[in-house]
Image: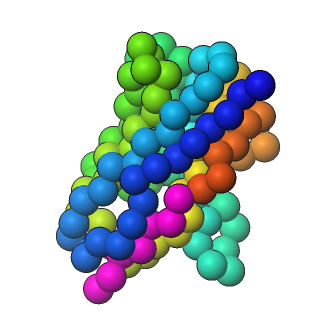
């Protein structure tokens, strides 16, 4: 049974930083972060290959967010800096076969963690 558990969300002022974590039980996968703001569709944020050797980012977060993973701990991270109010959303980690931007390609999802950025 594969389970993903996110942590690290919260309230932060614009310009601040947060680090999200996603603990994975079970197999190792390619991983991704997605987010969903109220009234909007879920959107891709970042992805990382199983080995951690390649990473991919949405244009809106490139240069501000960093995805990484600790293979030994089977934990995924998202370091977020220079946060903006438009980054406010529920953030989800996901596991799948490939590190891609399509949510439908991920087989397992966490429950989500709220990130709120105040102006």
Q: Is residue 12 left or right of residue 3?
A: left
Q: Main secondary structure of the magenta part?
A: strand
State which quadrant residue 35 falls in: bottom right
- Write the residue at 60% across / 56% down: 112
Q: Which residues are magenta?
A: 113-119
- Write the residue at 33% across / 42% down: 66
Going by the picture, which residue comes out furthest to the bottom? 119
Residue 114 point in image, percent of width and height: 50, 66
Residue 54 point in image, percent of width and height: 44, 23
Q: Is residue 7 left or right of residue 79?
A: right
User: From this viewpoint, is residue 101 visible?
Assistant: no
- Write the residue at 33% across / 49% down: 19
For residue 64: magenta? no
Q: Nearer the viewer, residue 87 or 110?
A: 110
Depicted 11 relative to depicted 106: above or below? below
Residue 85 point in image, percent of width and height: 37, 78
């Amino acid at each position: 049974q594969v389970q993903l558990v996110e942590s690290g969300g919260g309230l932060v002022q614009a310009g601040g930083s947060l680090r999200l974590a996603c603990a994975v039980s079970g197999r190792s996968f390619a991983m991704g972060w997605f987010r969903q703001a109220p009234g909007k569709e879920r959107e891709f944020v970042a992805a990382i290959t199983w080995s951690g050797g390649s990473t991919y980012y949405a244009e809106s977060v490139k240069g501000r967010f960093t995805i990484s993973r600790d293979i030994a701990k089977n934990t995924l991270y998202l370091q977020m800096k220079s946060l903006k109010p438009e980054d406010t959303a529920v953030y989800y980690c996901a596991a799948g076969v490939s590190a891609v931007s399509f949510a439908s390609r991920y087989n397992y999802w966490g429950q989500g963690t709220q990130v709120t950025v105040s102006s």
